[in-house]
Amino acid sequence: MLAFPYKYAANNLFWNEDKLQPLIQRINERYVHSDTKEKIYCYMLRIFLEEIYNTVILDETGHDINGWRIDCKRLGINS
């Protein structure tokens, strides 16, 4: 399996917004298993560090969560 579904799953799990709960539940059911959990957590850590770097060091705004949701829907990991 390509890394992209894991990356997008990790992104949604990282943000964990209320409006994403149906999607997050589906992601947990479909992607978060004992053999994939470590990979997803690594992507979540990368997202966290990238967000800190972008907002604190580069003084940029964070990522747009809606853009990620569109990508997830395109990849078939939406609710």
Image: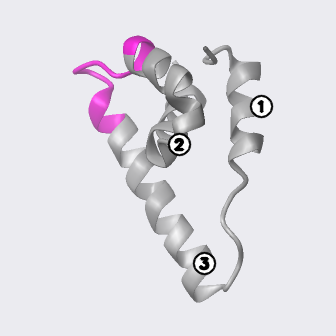
Residue at the front extreme?
18
Q: What residue type is labelled 2?
A: Glu
Q: Which residue is drawn at 68% across and 47% down?
A: 65
The tag on residue 55 is 3
Horizontal and vertical percent for residue 67?
A: 77, 42
Q: Residue at x 77, y 21 (%)?
A: 74
The tag on residue 14 is none
Instruction: Answer whether residue 11 is visible to the viewer in this image.
Output: yes
Q: Which residue has dot 2 on it?
A: 17
Q: What element carries label 2?
A: loop
Q: In which quarter of the image is residue 68?
A: top right
**Cβ–Cβ below 8 Å for labels 2 and 1?**
no
The tag on residue 70 is 1
Horizontal and vertical percent for residue 53?
A: 54, 77
Q: Which residue is drawn at 61% across and 14% down?
A: 79
Vertically, is 66 above or below 31?
below
Q: Nearer the viewer, residue 69 or 33?
A: 69
Instruction: Answer whether residue 8 is visible to the viewer in this image.
Output: no
Upstream in the sequence, badge 3 or badge 1? Answer: 3
Q: Residues within 10 Å of mark 1 (few under 14, many from 20)?
A: few
Side (left or right) of 69 relative to 16: right
User: For the residues marked 2 and 1, what is the alpha-carbon distance in whole angstroms?
Assistant: 15 Å
Asked if the magenta segment contains residue 11, the reply would be no
Q: What residue type is labelled 1?
A: Ile
Residue numbers of the magenta segment: 29-39
